[in-house]
Image (cartoon, helix red, strand yellow):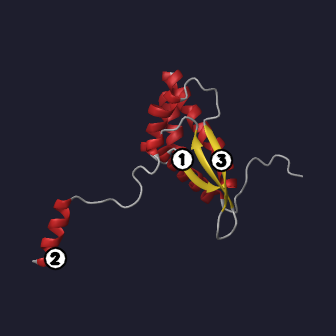
């Protein structure tokens, strides 16, 4: 029997699992939509919803704001995305009593047939998807300086 088993282990050590959830929550807050496996998505939902609830509690109770902010930063390990939780997401979901994250099934992965899912915020910002990810293009002045150094 599986009494008192709170979460999935996801075939990882505790430290790896905590780091993975912190990274995935930071990515979800940054892009507001990510694609992952279904078991990871099901573990991520309550993790992120508790972070947003802490952001809402900080907005409602200013004397506990610093404590809640530190708790969120310690769980997410990304101060920039924690700031987004308090400034953007807490205001966006101020009237919603819960259920900030949606999980959509997205078929099966080609390589190992793992069930995939899309995790996204309800009422998400569509423009945030893919924002600040991937290689960065340098401006033309930098390219010219590099080519001059190579030539000279």
Which image quadrant: the C terminus?
Answer: bottom left
Q: Say which mark, if any, is on residue 150.
A: 2
Query: In x, y percent, where is residue 145?
Result: 15, 66
Q: Is residue 109 above or below residue 99?
A: below
Query: In x, y percent, where is residue 107?
Result: 68, 57
Q: Secondary structure at mark 2?
A: helix
Query: Mark 1 or mark 3, which has the lower sequence index?
Result: 1
| Distance between the alpha carbons at the discs numbered 1 and 2 | 41 Å
Q: Say which mark, if any, is on residue 13.
A: none
| Distance between the alpha carbons at the discs numbered 1 and 3 | 11 Å
Tell us which disc is closer to us: 3 or 2: 3
Q: Secondary structure at mark 3?
A: strand
In percent of the image, x 48 and y 22: which residue is there? 62
Q: Is residue 99 left or right of residue 23?
A: right
- What is the tally of numbered marks visible in this picture? 3
Query: In x, y percent, where is residue 132?
Result: 39, 51
The residue carrying mark 1 is 33
| Distance between the alpha carbons at the discs numbered 3 and 2 | 50 Å
């Amino acid at each position: 029997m599986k009494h008192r088993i709170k979460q999935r282990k996801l075939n990882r050590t505790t430290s790896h699992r905590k780091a993975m959830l912190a990274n995935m929550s930071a990515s979800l807050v940054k892009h507001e939509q990510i694609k992952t496996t279904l078991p990871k998505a099901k573990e991520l939902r309550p993790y992120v919803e508790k972070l947003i609830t802490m952001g809402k509690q900080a907005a409602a109770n200013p004397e506990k704001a610093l404590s809640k902010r530190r708790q969120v930063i310690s769980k997410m390990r990304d101060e920039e995305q924690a700031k987004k939780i308090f400034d953007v997401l807490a205001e966006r979901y101020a009237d919603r009593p819960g259920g900030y994250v949606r999980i959509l099934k997205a078929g099966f992965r080609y390589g190992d047939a793992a069930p995939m899912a899309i995790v996204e915020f309800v009422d998400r910002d569509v423009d945030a998807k893919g924002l600040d990810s991937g290689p960065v293009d340098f401006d033309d002045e930098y390219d010219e300086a590099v080519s001059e150094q190579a030539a000279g």
